[in-house]
Image (cartoon, rainbow, N blue to C red):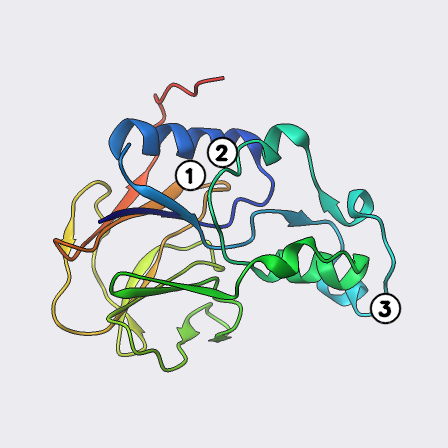
Amino acid sequence: MLYALLGDLHSNIEDTKAVLAHIQQTAEEATIIGLGDLYECTVSKKKAQTMSGLSLEKAAIVENEFEELLTFPSIRGNQEERITQVTGIQRFKALPESIEIDGAILMHGHQFKWNVNWQPTFPPFHQPLLFFGHSHESGLYHQQKKLPIRIRYGQPIAIQEKQYGVNVGSVIDHREWCLYDSKKRTVTFMCVPPTINVTE
């Protein structure tokens, strides 16, 4: 089965439109799943510790045009959790912390420990693959280390019988996503080319 995995949208309409159009053009049959941080919380992590009872409009960038693009299931990220914290609104609590698909588990990544160089330490997981985001930096990991490979967008990477972490990159700013073929056991890093036509 084909999965189009995307995360870190941060309420960006144009980048989200471009990625969804790219998925439609290159992997129309893929099941789309979000990896969290769909929305942008406008309250900083520090200020959120002392704030509560805010309206959704004051706590996040929420536009109808953006929400109409969110037609796919998603897990929650730290942005959704912070919005919930400062508003008390329950709508994002319905988003799961993780989702399991064929041969893989999906998490946002804010649950991991991150060092000063933004490299993660993964929690134990039983699936062969762990897809995540959070750092806005795509990459392939094995045994807690980022592999020194050059990512070539659109070229499938055959996954061996080992455990890997896969950072799918970010929709915002980079327009990246990841195509996962659970039958062929391949991971393909994808990036919207500059010339893509975004359907209005």
In this rendering, the answer to whether 160 lies above or below 198 is: below
Q: Which of 74 and 168 is in front in this view?
A: 74
Q: Do the residues labelled 2 and 3 touch (CB within 8 Å)?
A: no
Q: Mark 1 points at which residue?
A: 175
Q: Name the residue under label 3.
A: 50
Q: Distance between the residues labelled 2 and 3?
A: 32 Å
**Disc 1, SS:** loop
Label whose residue precedes the other's in the sequence (2 or 3): 2
The structure residue drawn at horizontal position 70% and vertical position 61%, both measured from the top left corner, is: 82
For residue 15, which numbered disc appears in the image? 2
Determine the residue located farthest toward the bottom in the rendered image.
Answer: 124
Q: Are marks 3 and 1 in contact (CB under 8 Å)?
A: no
In this rendering, the answer to whether 21 lies above or below 151 is: above
Q: What amino acid type is highlighted by mark number 1?
A: Arg
Q: What amino acid type is highlighted by mark number 3?
A: Thr
Label whose residue precedes the other's in the sequence (1 or 2): 2
Label whose residue precedes the other's in the sequence (3 or 1): 3
Q: Does residue 84 appear to the left or right of 133 in the view shown?
A: right
Q: Distance between the residues labelled 3 and 1?
A: 34 Å
Count neighbours of disc 2 (C-alpha within 10 A) and say few if under 14, some if 14 to 19, many if 20 or more: many
Count neighbours of disc 1 (C-alpha within 10 A) and say few if under 14, some if 14 to 19, many if 20 or more: many
What count of labels does the image hold? 3
Determine the residue located farthest toward the front in the rendered image.
Answer: 94
**Disc 2, SS:** helix
The structure residue drawn at horizontal position 65% and vertical position 47%, both measured from the top left corner, is: 40
Q: Do the residues labelled 1 and 2 touch (CB within 8 Å)?
A: yes
Q: What amino acid type is highlighted by mark number 2?
A: Asp
Q: Position of residue 177 (x, y in %)?
A: 36, 45
